[in-house]
Image (cartoon, rainbow, N blue to C red):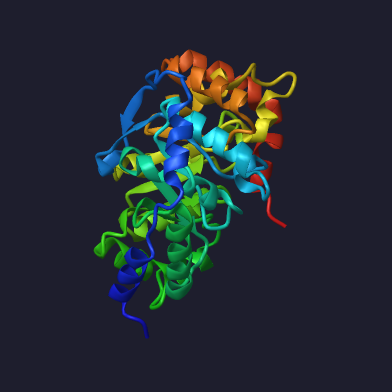
Amino acid sequence: MFKPTSRRYFLLGGFTLAGTIALKNQLKSNNQPLLPIPERILGKTGVSVPIFGLGGAGKTPLSQANKEKESRKIIAAAYSGGIRYFDTAASYGPSEEYLGKVLPPFRQQVFLASKTGARDREGAWRDLERSLQRLNTDYLDLWQLHHVSFREELDQIFGENGAIKALEEAKEQKIVRFSGITGHHEPEVIAEGLRRYAFDTTLITLNAADIHHPRPFSTGVLPLAKAQNLGVIAMKVPAYGRLFKPGVLKGMSEAMGYSLSLEGVHCCIIAAENVPQLQSNLEVARNYQPLNPEQMRAIEQKTAHAWEDNNFFRAWT
């Protein structure tokens, strides 16, 4: 049986910033000004984060092989545009590696979040080691249990040799600052996870069509998260662009505006297909104003007929 402290030594011993000088020069050449994005305190973490962060999933360059050049441009534009929250996962293809080639010179200025899909202690540790090596860092600001969907998974996670052990050990060794749980399948499973363990954050589906689902995340998880003062990060905000089909929402201003106006939400993460799309989303975030109840209801009415299409990722076969 390994000693957890030996892993900390291994990680620090292998830490390197080779190649980052050239990347720092690349970012310095980007003359895009740092315009302010509104910020909120991420629940009990006490950390102030911009309301808009960069996601690393989906069919975007960050999660695809042979897309390093495009990914580096997106990451650089995100940082120079004011984004400080960067989301990735061990299972997001080369996303961690791409981020690890751009962000190290600015590590102290960003909030870096990754995830493990492992449900056992050993598997979670292996994911964490790989994540740190790929990200070119010796710690994560947030490490999350990824896509928890079934009660059986909770039993594994919180079992004698469950992934929660690795998370606790990593926090004790200061390899991980905060812990989280994520999911976009079943709200009650996430809520049960929050009742079983004192997580710091939760990353959940919160888009403008969620409220029409028979089991919404906005009513099934948000109240509990707020009661526990958790940091809440919204995902699937545009439902992979399906919310922008004809006859639904007008654009990202409505999609992002709705998710960020839900009581208890602190920020959202959205992936980008290219730099112009990212910059458009940045402009929406910079100009964000909380929506009033009437505006929220109007948006909900627009999505009432399309809620199934915009919750397609919750289907399970």
Q: Quadrant of the N terminus?
A: bottom left
Q: Quadrant of the C terminus?
A: bottom right
Residue at 56%, 47% (x, y): give it: 184
Q: Is residue 61 left or right of residue 83?
A: right
Q: Residue 79: image x %, image y %?
A: 44, 32
Q: Residue 108: image x %, image y %?
A: 30, 42
Residue at 56%, 49% (x, y): give it: 95
Q: Residue 312: image x %, image y %?
A: 69, 42
Please indicate, yes or no, whether residue 233 appears anywhere in the rendered image: no
The image quadrant of residue 28 is top left
The image quadrant of residue 81 is top left
Give the answer, above or below, for where 174 lies relative to 81: below
Residue at 49%, 47% (x, y): give it: 101
Q: Residue 135: image x %, image y %?
A: 45, 53
The foreground one among 17 and 240 is 17
Q: Is residue 168 left or right of residue 118?
A: left
